[in-house]
Amino acid sequence: MKNILRGVNRFYIEDAGQIIAEITFVNSGAERLIIDHTFVSNQLRGEGVGEALVEKVVNLAREENKKIIPLCPFAKSQFGKKPDYRNVLAH
């Protein structure tokens, strides 16, 4: 898998100057992050890139002691599949 980079309110993968995968989030107050978008190009589909991007935001939330509101349908589905993410899920 290509290297996942960190930007302002996003994690992404770049190839030849093009964004080929990205997850974006915004702060909601001091204690929450909202995942609002996940994108994975066709060339990376099926390689677990989307899951890795969600995991990056989950790890960030844990480091910063924040909770996540997964508005993006893909991120929301990951929270349903991974019980170990529930400790960072905002209720």
Image: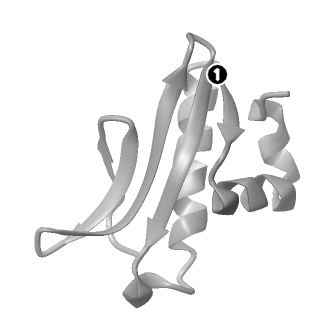
The image position of residue 79, as x and y in percent, is 78, 52
**Which one is nearer the viewer's eye here, 66 or 28?**
28
Work out whether residue 3 or residue 18 is closer to the camera in this orientation and state it: 18
Q: Can you give x and y, in whole percent of width and height, for residue 60 in the image?
A: 53, 34
Q: Is residue 25 above or below residue 19?
A: above
Tell me where residue 85 sits by quadrant. top right
- Image side of residue 80 versus residue 19, left or right: right
Residue at 58 percent across and 29 percent down: it is: 33
Can you say whether 10 is above or below 73 in the image? above
**Crowding at mark 1 (Cα within 10 Å: few <14, some 14-19, many 20+):** many
Q: Report the residue marked by disc 1.
A: 66
Tell me which colouring the rendered structure shows. Answer: one colour
Apparent side of residue 39 relative to residue 70 in the rendered image (left or right): left
Q: Locate the N terminus by quadrant.
A: bottom left
In the picture, measured across the screen, residue 33 lies left or right of residue 8, that is right
Dot 1 amino acid type: Lys
Assign a secondary structure to mark 1.
Answer: loop
Q: Quadrant of the C terminus?
A: top right
Q: Residue at x 49, y 39 (%)?
A: 25
Q: Where in the figure is residue 90, as x and y percent of width and height? A: 78, 29
Q: Residue furthest top?
A: 30
At 78% from the left and 35% from the top, the residue drawn is 89
Q: Vertical placement of 25 versus 29: above or below? A: below
Q: Quadrant of residue 29?
A: top right
Judged left or right of residue 12, residue 23 is right
| Residue 69 in the image: above or below residue 91 | below
Residue sitting at 58 percent across and 53 percent down? 54
